[in-house]
């Protein structure tokens, strides 16, 4: 095999094919959700009038909002997907829900904030190349959150590996509470507040909106989120499927005992899984901070829960599934929040209820998720 | 008591036995006296109360460990609960509120213990049932204008006892509602779905001011009705006030505090009885079987669906009843009082005390609620006192003035709970007072391959509890 065909092969397997798969997921989910939304809007074309003065044509409204809704949904979707990857990887290897992942995510967001604020204090923020800034934030957050996840695994989960299944979950809840207050204390001491607003105003690049059509614009933040998420997913795909360590992780997730007999260091593999999952969570934290504009010690909880829902939706333990679940959930949420305001008897505040209802419905009708396989409980 | 324990017991020494009894009684009396004579203006008084009240509160567990007859133990505990505590409460109403809240949490924890400890179903949304009970009373008796008010469906105050039973039924029904969809789920999935359910209930109550205003949304309900006082409570209070010439602003307030204290005590007693009988019943054994191995339990003919639903319903009903009491005592409700942290708080009680162990859960309720409601607060005010006096720790030269305001100890409950949960799970996974069954089970879980010549303790014919291989 010549070098060029090998290179072509490599590019196809590890870049093009997964990329096309992501594209397929995005377009497929977007199309599916749009069709559902259109049908709903046609059924309730004039929903219960919001006072007699307003006559809304829901269908027209939907079409007007469709591009924004889709962009918003896909952006949130990628964010959820990246967080969900952390849940799903750990679940795949240890069959355990890392409850503290939402706090690892939050810590990543805080680290991103710290990087940005320190650059601003050194009055470097305005002159710093914005792309480099984002990369710096993400890398710092990945390093910190990844390390944190490994430390947590070492001290709070490893000693409990043979304990009944509820036990590590409880220590994860403990870690979660502890981290929330630890971050609150540290930031409270250092900055005298713990609701941390990203100084995005100082970086005009990040607040820009680019036109992508006659009426539609897309924010730079959304582009950053989508691009970095795609890069991370491709990287993860390569790491898990092509490298030796990835092979080790897959082996451990299939059968720990056998893997260890084959000379794989199970503890090391689990630590690496936590490192990678935590790093992804940290990066997602920065992306979330850029999108939401602020982060607080308690802002990990809801995105974490939703990302978990996404992981379950796609089939927990399954990396492709997490991606699909994340994008689908993001879109579902975006459509709910764009359509619900037209149903005055509900209003947007009910959208969280629907998100949890979806989770419960999936678990009733397809507990293994969309792409998951039935895993029989070992007796 | 098994033969083994009888042999190992030290020779019965009356002096020693009653000496310890006397020591415990003196200890209790000393703590009581410290609290009753405490001068709250002293700098270190928060520290002393933070030590003495918890010590007093857990002393029933010391009494239970004494080597004396059951009658004496029961007598001493009843004296503590029915005389010492009320006297303390009359002296400082804070202690009444504290004891009542501990009781509310204890009964809820006993309910959650049925779900988590007995049946092994991790429920992270337990507070939802508490909210259901509380809102049941709130919706029907609140002074706030809501839809129920508008259509004239308000309940009179004497319906309190009816609502207590109604809440048990409604909460049990909610438990079944939650149980039905999650029956097929195990372990972690169940945890997340119950969490979602709890949040859903909270969001629902938070938003039920539209389409029709039922819960008054974020603002919550105000001016809930108080149940009518039973006449004997009134006369007891009057007697107390006149006999001891107490300077009470409003005897009615005192009477209500006494009433709620006794009510909670009675409900707790009932809860202990119900939970204890359930644990020893065939139902309890079925739950244990499900907890240990669902597949095996199914194979042995345990009706999984019925038993799991029953666990959810029973657990929920405890919280529902306590919800009504809580609402009637505090007379106002906001949806955010029923958030995820509350569920975690109740779970922490169960874990810290000991999953599946009734005594453990009661101890856990005392320890965790006091930590939350009293100890952290006391430490905060101690630090404030020291700050105001410019106190300095001598050796390391730390001036309390420099203690940052951001680190007000009372605001760091999560921090303390987080560490508490981790430490307990790592070093005492079965809790402070483990259930005997679970203790055996956890002690057996070691890496040493079982010695086949020895009869495993859980298969031996005696119920020797935690003796393990030594038996």
Image (cartoon, rainbow, N blue to C red):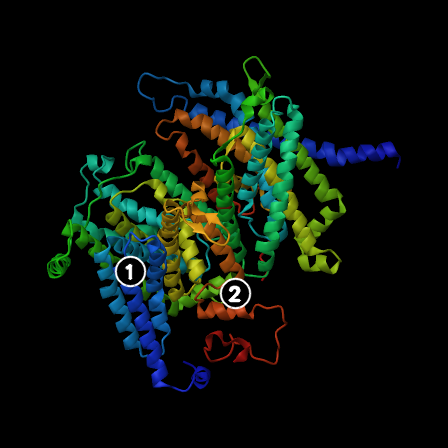
Q: CA distance from mark 2 to mark 1?
A: 53 Å
Picture quarter with the N terminus of chain A: top right
Compared across the picture, whether B382 is left or right of A83 comes to left
Tell me the chain of label 2.
Answer: B
Locate residue B461 relative to residue B94 in the image: left or right.
Answer: right
Q: In front: A320, or B261? A: B261
**Most extreme residue toward the top, as rendered?**
A214
Say if residue B192 shows up in the picture.
yes
Relative to residue A357, is residue A33 depicted above or below?
A: above
Q: Residue at x 68, y 60 (%)?
A: A257
Residue A345: quadrant of the picture: top left
Image location (x, y in percent) of residue A98: 56, 48
Neighbour tally class for label 2: few under 14, some 14-19, many 20 plus, Cα within 10 Å? few
Snapshot quadrant of residue A19 = top right
Q: Secondary structure at mark 1?
A: helix
SS of the residue under disc 2: helix
Instruction: Name the foreground residue: A266 vs A44.
Output: A266
What crowding class fits label 1: few (fewer than 14 Cα within 10 Å), some (14-19), or many (20 or more)? many
The residue carrying mark 1 is B35
Give the answer, above or below, for where A89 lies relative to B80.
Answer: above
Residue corresponding to mark 2:
B296
User: Which of pointers 2 and 1 indicates the residue nearer the eye?
Assistant: 1
Percent of width and height locating residue B248 = 16, 52
Q: Estimate the x, y position of residue B414 in percent, counting from the top left.
A: 45, 48
| Of residues B391 and B293, the one drawn nearer to the viewer in this rendering | B391
Q: Return the x and y of residue B361 as percentages of the image width and height.
A: 39, 62
In the image, residue B293 sits, relative to residue A356, either above or below, namely below
């Amino acid at each position: 095999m010549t070098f060029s065909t090998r290179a072509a092969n490599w590019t196809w397997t590890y870049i093009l094919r997964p990329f096309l798969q992501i594209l397929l997921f995005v377009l497929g989910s977007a199309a599916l959700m749009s069709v559902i939304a259109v049908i709903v809007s046609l059924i309730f074309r004039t929903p219960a009038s919001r006072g007699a003065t307003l006559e809304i044509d829901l269908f027209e409204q939907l079409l007007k909002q469709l591009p924004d809704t889709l962009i918003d949904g896909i952006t949130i979707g990628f964010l959820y997907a990246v967080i969900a990857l952390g849940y799903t990887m750990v679940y795949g290897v240890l069959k355990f829900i890392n409850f503290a992942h939402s706090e690892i995510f939050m810590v990543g967001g805080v680290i991103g904030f710290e990087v940005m604020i320190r650059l601003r204090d050194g009055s470097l923020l305005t002159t710093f190349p914005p792309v480099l800034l984002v990369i710096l934030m993400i890398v710092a957050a990945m390093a910190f959150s990844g390390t944190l996840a490994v430390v947590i695994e070492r001290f709070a989960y490893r000693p409990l590996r043979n304990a009944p299944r509820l036990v590590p979950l409880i220590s994860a809840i403990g870690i979660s509470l502890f981290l929330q207050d630890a971050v609150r204390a540290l930031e409270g001491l250092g900055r005298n507040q713990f609701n941390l607003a990203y100084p995005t105003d100082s970086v005009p690049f990040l607040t820009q909106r680019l036109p992508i059509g006659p009426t539609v614009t897309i924010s730079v933040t959304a582009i950053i989120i989508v691009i970095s998420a795609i890069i991370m997913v491709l990287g993860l795909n390569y790491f898990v499927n092509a490298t030796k360590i990835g092979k080790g992780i897959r082996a451990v997730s299939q059968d720990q005992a056998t893997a260890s007999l084959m000379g794989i260091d199970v503890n090391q593999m689990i630590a690496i899984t936590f490192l990678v999952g935590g790093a992804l969570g940290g990066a997602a934290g920065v992306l979330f901070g850029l999108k939401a504009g602020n982060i607080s010690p308690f802002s990990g909880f809801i995105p974490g829960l939703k990302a978990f829902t996404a992981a379950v939706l796609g089939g927990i333990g399954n990396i492709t599934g997490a991606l699909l679940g994340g994008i689908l959930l993001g879109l579902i949420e975006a459509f709910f929040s764009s359509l619900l305001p037209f149903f005055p008897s509900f209003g947007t505040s009910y959208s969280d209820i629907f998100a949890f209802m979806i989770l419960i419905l999936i678990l009733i009708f397809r507990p293994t998720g969309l792409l998951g396989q039935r895993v029989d409980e070992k007796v | 008591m098994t033969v083994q324990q009888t042999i190992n017991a030290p020779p019965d020494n009356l002096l020693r036995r009653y000496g310890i009894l006397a020591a415990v009684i003196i200890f209790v009396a000393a703590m009581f006296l410290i609290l009753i004579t405490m001068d709250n203006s002293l700098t270190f008084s928060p520290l002393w109360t933070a030590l003495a009240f918890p010590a007093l509160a857990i002393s029933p567990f010391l009494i239970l460990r004494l080597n004396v007859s059951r009658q004496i133990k029961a007598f001493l505990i009843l004296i503590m609960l029915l005389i010492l505590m009320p006297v303390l409460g009359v002296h400082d109403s804070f202690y009444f509120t504290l004891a009542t809240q501990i009781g509310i949490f204890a009964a809820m924890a006993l309910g959650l213990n049925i779900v988590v400890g007995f049946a092994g179903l991790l429920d992270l949304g337990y507070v939802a049932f508490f909210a259901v009970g509380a809102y049941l009373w709130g919706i029907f008796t609140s002074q706030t204008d809501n839809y129920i008010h508008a259509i004239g469906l308000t309940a009179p105050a004497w319906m309190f006892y009816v609502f207590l039973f109604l809440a048990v039924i409604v909460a049990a029904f909610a438990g079944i509602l939650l149980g039905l969809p999650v029956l097929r789920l195990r372990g972690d999935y169940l945890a997340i779905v119950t969490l979602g359910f709890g949040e859903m209930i909270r969001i629902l109550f938070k938003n039920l001011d539209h389409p029709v205003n039922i819960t008054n949304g974020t603002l919550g309900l105000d001016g809930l009705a108080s149940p009518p006082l039973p006449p004997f409570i009134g006369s007891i209070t009057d007697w107390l006030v006149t006999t001891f010439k107490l300077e009470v602003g409003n005897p009615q307030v005192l009477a209500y505090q006494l009433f709620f204290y006794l009510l909670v005590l009675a409900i707790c007693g009932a809860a202990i009885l119900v939970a204890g009988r359930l644990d020893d019943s065939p139902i309890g054994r079925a739950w244990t079987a499900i907890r240990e191995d669902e597949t095996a339990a199914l194979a042995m003919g345990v009706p999984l669906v019925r038993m799991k639903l029953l666990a959810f319903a029973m657990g929920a009903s405890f919280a529902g009843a306590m919800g009504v009491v809580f609402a009637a005592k505090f007379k106002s409700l906001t949806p955010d009082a029923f958030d995820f942290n509350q569920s975690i708080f109740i779970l922490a009680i169960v874990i810290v005390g000991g999953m599946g162990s009734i005594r453990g859960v009661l101890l856990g309720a005392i320890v965790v609620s006091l930590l939350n409601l009293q100890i952290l607060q006391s430490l905060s005010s101690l630090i404030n006192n020291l700050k105001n006096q410019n106190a300095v720790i001598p050796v390391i030269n730390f001036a309390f003035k420099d203690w940052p305001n951001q680190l007000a100890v009372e605001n760091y409950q999560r921090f303390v709970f987080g560490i508490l949960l981790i430490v307990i799970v790592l070093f005492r996974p079965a809790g402070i007072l483990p259930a005997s069954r679970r203790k055996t089970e956890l002690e057996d879980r070691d890496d040493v391959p079982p010695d086949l010549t020895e009869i495993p303790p859980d298969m031996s014919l005696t119920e020797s509890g935690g003796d393990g291989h030594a038996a």
